[in-house]
Image (cartoon, grey):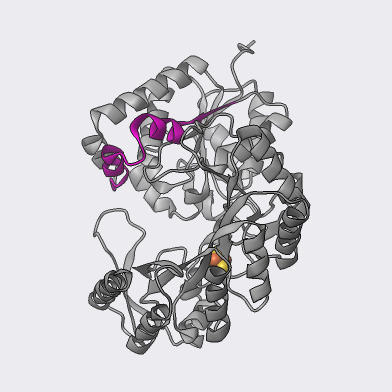
Amino acid sequence: MKNTHRPDICLVLMPYGFSYNMPSPSISAVKPMLENAGYDVQCMDLNSKYVVRNGMFDKDLLKTTCAVSYGEFLDTVSPDYLKFLDEMVDKIVRMAPWVVGFSFYFRPAWHASSYVAAKVKRHLDCTIVAGGASIDTTVIGVFQRETPASTFDMFMHGESELSLLELLGILKEKQYPGSLDEHTLTQLVRIIPGSFSLKDPILCPLNIRKDVVQNLDDLPLPDFSDSDLSVSKTLPVTLARGCTARCAFCSSRRTHPEFRMMSGKRAVMVVLHLQETYGINNFYFSSPLINGDINKLRDMCNEVIKNNLHFTFSGLVRLSKQVREEDIELMCVAGFRWIKFGLESGSGYVRKTMGKLEGQDHVYRLLKRTSESGSIAAVNIMHSFPTETEEHFNETIEFISQFTPKELAWEGWPFNLGHTNNALLDRAFVKKFDIAVHKVRELTPGKPTFALDVEWSNINITGKIRHDRQRRLQAFRDEWLK
Ligand code: SF4
């Protein structure tokens, strides 16, 4: 009989190496779900731990997370960071969980995860799995190139808490077999939707998990008790999962194939619980969009106002005809102080081809109303989309010029074709907008990267043009900010 005092699972979130003012929503959501199913769950939020220990901007960590391969990670990792990781390995080994689950919330955490996982495996007979959003947006080939195949027993796509529950059920029944042999793995990845193993990559594309947590009101309350919140000013709240739109460049549907949103009442209950438990009043709705169901968003705002609650909120809003100026006003009265809109381009035509709202006046009024109502309006700008001519690019600059730096916050970067831009590789889309990729090459030949340099047959946005537009946008921004 195995030692029953070992926890069933330890969930590990690695440091991801950029500015931090709130913990990740990932392990805080998975932990209570597994606990409700009867499992003994331990969590290690190494991201908050490391930031509290080393400060917000740790140059050594930033350098390490930019490493493009595991070998480069080992060459560049600082002795201090390695010492920290070794301490964490010791903790995990002493804790001795039957399963260790790594959250790949952000891609830069991979190499450190591989390092810790490999060391844990050397000292502890356990099953090692990895899940999280960055797994869905990564081609399997990149995992194969970057991750030693024997380190992780299994990976999980999509909303991996469901796959994790199924895996734990099976492993517990087998009295936790530890590291999984190839035969067992092949059997498991065939029966657990969303799971795959590098040892059996043929199944990967066929094994996307299609079922999801249908009603977000049924999710247990998030648990941040394992995160060091001493430098956190904000807590994340998953108001919605998935998106109602299908923008041509976006990969959000790979992680969450269906859109779902919490009811207004439940959202307020979650926020109240977090405020009471952790004494924090600022909340960021960490969802691809918060207005996928505008009535639920209005309900939530009305509920906050009716009960005279005092929070501050921020979140991402999709620009759509459904959103009226009064909605923005309502959100600001309820406590929104930062609203980010997926504008991407100042040209209505380019937005239309992206699958976004075309109407210039409506977009302009919503952004103006946000700042007039006392909130910061922030937008993304993505130049060099394959339908963007020189005139469209100039339209973007003219559009932004209508705002002052006090009214609008924005950053610009070029469009990159990655494997997740399915629409651009879709024949109907390509035909509709006369787009054809005729040259694609990796920006850093031979090195794993998502970014691809593309020339299009209709407009021909070469790498040179992209770089030139980036430079001009930056020059405009510098002048505009003066
Ligand atoms: S609205 Fe945002 S999250 Fe939704 S598909 Fe478009 S870019 Fe992606």
Residue at 48% in and 45% down: 105
Q: Does 50 appear in magenta?
A: yes
Please give the range of residues in magenta: 42-68
Q: Does 33 appear in magenta?
A: no
Residue 361: quadrant of the picture: bottom right
Residue at 59% in and 54% down: 313
Q: Is residue 244 visible?
A: yes
Q: Quadrant of the N terminus?
A: top right
Residue 453: quadrant of the picture: bottom left
Q: Quadrant of the C terminus?
A: bottom left
Q: Is residue 87 left or right of residue 44?
A: left
Quadrant position of ligand 1: bottom right
Q: Nearer the viewer, residue 380 or 171?
A: 380
Q: Position of residue 297 (x, y in %)?
A: 70, 61
Q: Is residue 187 visible?
A: no
Q: Nearer the viewer, residue 397 or 189?
A: 397
Q: Position of residue 135 (x, y in %)?
A: 48, 49
* Figure check: 326 above or below 44: below
Q: Is residue 179 left or right of residue 469?
A: right
Residue 288: quadrant of the picture: bottom right
* Figure check: 228 above or below 175: below
